[in-house]
Amino acid sequence: MKKLMAANWKMYKVRAEASATAADLAARLDGKLPEDREVLVIPPFTALWAVGEAFAGKPGLSLGGQDFYPAKEGAFTGEIAPAMLLDAGCRYVLTGHSERRHVLGEDDAFVGQKTAFGLAAGLSVILCVGEKVEERKAGQVEAVVTRQLAAGLSEIPTDVLPEKLAIAYEPVWAIGTGLTAGPKEVEEAHAMIRAWLIGRFGPQNGALVRILYGGSVKPGNAGTLLGIDNVDGVLVGGASLEAESFSAIVTA
Ligand code: PGA
């Protein structure tokens, strides 16, 4: 199982900027991408084709979408369908990102609907979960994360191919704040998620679903985070916007 090193560019970069960063990243990783790692860049929709072009023919670099609407097509102004992401070269897509939940108002049920729809449409889905600071202070990490997992994966068949699904544990208080969860907090949360996945998908498949950590991952802390049990990759926002820092994370 390769570690998944994912760059979430959020609402940053027009096409020329995305193209330049993707080309710079591909050049920096040329011949240097560790065998056991896979790189995923998740740009804004308008830059998908540009990043796809920069990655064409480069093994180990793939493309993902930040969001989609769970319908094949239709009168959904402003939305994008899984088939459109696949057409633009995406293999992966995010669901349940903290900003979709807490800024754009997506609830657990809608995240579950999207996760099932994205998988059925042929995308590999990274379901993001994570508690807010007040929930951590109230000792509710397990309650919140298992609620998000149960709802997020409620419609997924038990025999889903484990390589098509990943979970990103992103404590909300660590996203974009410079605060990273400590090694012990990460280890505990990831072990809890692993146990839950094994309960849901069985010992074999549950052990193969990758669990990424996200929240202020930087070149200086990536090595430590990736060394923690059950950390099968990272989801990086701010530090993924520059090829220099993201390539340092990828090879950390
Ligand atoms: P950050 O964002 O690395 O800037 O904290 C992570 C994310 O939102 O996926």
Image (cartoon, rainbow, N blue to C red):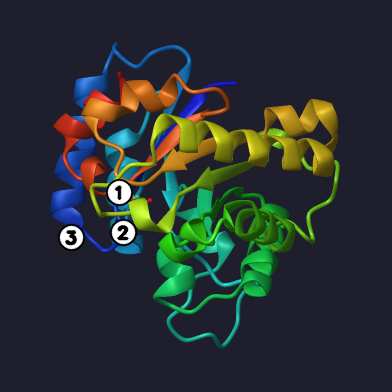
**Residue type at the position of mark 3:** Val
Determine whether the beta carbon of the residue marked 2 sits less than 8 angstroms from the nearest atom of ligand 1: yes
Identify the residue position indicated by label 1 in the image.
Answer: 237
At mark 2, the secondary structure is loop
Q: Residue at x 15, y 30 (%)?
A: 244
Mark nearest the camera among 1 and 2 is: 1
Report whether 30 appears left or right of 93.
left
**Residue type at the position of mark 2:** Lys
**Which residue occupies the extreme front position in the image?**
138
Report whether 215 appears left or right of 158.
left
The Cα atoms of the two marked residues, 2 and 3, are separated by 11 Å
Residue 185 image offset from top left, x and y in percent: 48, 38
At mark 1, the secondary structure is loop
Report whether 55 appears left or right of 100.
left
The Cα atoms of the two marked residues, 1 and 3, are separated by 16 Å
Q: Is residue 66 above or below residue 124?
A: below
Identify the residue position indicated by label 3 in the image.
Answer: 14
Identify the residue position indicated by label 2 in the image.
Answer: 10
Q: Residue at x 48, y 79 (%)?
A: 105
Residue 196 image offset from top left, x and y in percent: 74, 42
Does residue 228 show up? yes
Mark nearest the camera among 2 and 3 is: 2
Instruction: Identify which residue, 42 or 110, lies in the foreground.
Output: 110
Q: Is residue 168 above or below residue 118?
A: above
- Tag 1 near tag 2, CB within 8 Å: yes
Q: Is residue 155 above or below residue 50?
A: below
The Cα atoms of the two marked residues, 1 and 2, are separated by 7 Å
Quarter of the figure that contains the N terminus: top right
- Tag 2 near tag 3, CB within 8 Å: no
